[in-house]
Image: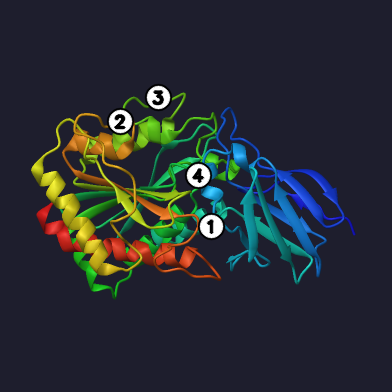
Amino acid sequence: MTILISAAFDSGNIRPTAIADTQVTLEIVRDRESDFYQWFHFRALGVRGRAVSYAIANAGGSAFPGGWENYRPCWSEDRVTWRRVADSHYADGVLRFTHEAKGDAVWFAYFAPYSMERHDDCVARIAARPGVGLASLGQTLDGREMDCLTLGDGPKQVWLYARQHPGESMAEWWMEGALEALTDAADPIARSLRHKATFHIVPNMNPDGSFRGHLRTNAVGVNLNREWHQPTADRSPEVLCVRNAMDASGVDFAMDVHGDEAIAAVFLAGFEGIPSLSERQSALYARYQDALVARTPDFQKAKGYGTTPKGRANLAMSTNQLAERFGCVAMTLEMPFKDNDDLPDAEFGWSPERSMRLGRDCLGALHDIIEEL
């Protein structure tokens, strides 16, 4: 039986270039109107009991080629449980991996996908719970609604938003975990947070790119996390409508949830380089990091990005823009595509389940500092 490769589905991305018996050669497709690519998600059919070798031939030209070192693709036969391929290696610009499926079909992805169907189900489920509001802040270029969930009645204004870069699907798994925690009537931390703060939550900042199978951009090839200084309706309506809503509510605390291709750790990136940086902002950011370290061994402070000197921050990025614009505590949370090397899991690597649990832990850390905001 000839092996069939397909990616014509929600978040699908791959192009087969050669299939010879059990040798499959593939290419990742670039984001539309962009040079970015790295996300892949495809199905292989006709693979039952066959040790199939896959080669992604253009991996070396991707957005972050360092991300392929020590990386193992995710696979699933039921699209529910996603494990890591055991046999995978990167050399000479090609990612190669071998897998023998038990069933007729197997799905592979850069990280466990979070579909727009699951997004809709999660939003509907959370919106139906007591005390939760749902609104659209605007529409994307493909006509999708920018869903925003609100809950809580406290004076502190907290914004949580994720997946500006659509290929970073762990960010929306984090969101599902955070939303489930915040709406848990039996969770005392959630009850206290809802009393002390009003939460504005955008689970997916880039639904068009998510559905199209993009790594980093929206429907017209725009990196949304470089638009926050001057968003426009024709290039970045997603950012424009969210930033307008933030202007209306004010912001005391903001978290932008992402994934990092190369660094095998969970870490935070801050706003140290903004022109108006205050000692209060810096102290609260440090307090939050310490609180999260105390909450979970999956978080650490040793690995991460370098610190930008004061006055040199890129204000087109959301964390910097919000910290400068509102004088708030803002941060970017990064999770790995690979694994947490300090606490590795050979079977699953960094996973949806760990992402969701981290969402709950991040809320716990917020509770530890919220009185000081």
Q: Residues within 10 Å of mark 3 (few under 14, many from 20)?
A: some
Nearer to us: label 4 or label 2:
2
Q: Amino acid at mark 2?
A: Asn
Q: Which mark is residue 166?
A: 4
Nearer to us: label 1 or label 4:
4
Disc with the residue nearer the chain's start (4 vs 2): 4
Q: Are marks 4 and 2 in contact (CB under 8 Å)?
A: no
Image coordinates of residue 294 in percent, x first then y, are 23, 68
Q: Amino acid at mark 3?
A: Thr
Disc with the residue nearer the chain's start (2 vs 3): 3
Looking at the image, which is closer to me, 104 or 135? 104
Question: In the image, what residue occupies the spot 53% across and 70% down?
Answer: 346
Image coordinates of residue 19 in percent, x first then y, are 83, 49
Looking at the image, which is closer to me, 148 or 175? 175
Image coordinates of residue 103 in percent, x first then y, are 76, 70
**Relative vertical location of residue 227 with respect to residue 209 in this rendering, above or below:** above
Give the structural element (helix, strand or loop) at label 3: loop
Is residue 13 at least partly visible in the picture? yes
Q: Are marks 3 and 4 in contact (CB under 8 Å)?
A: no
Cα distance, mark 1 to mark 3?
29 Å
Displayed quadrant of residue 30: top right
Disc with the residue nearer the chain's start (1 vs 4): 1
Disc with the residue nearer the chain's start (1 vs 3): 1
Q: Which mark is residue 232?
A: 3
Reading the image, the residue beneath label 2 is 314
Displayed quadrant of residue 230: top left
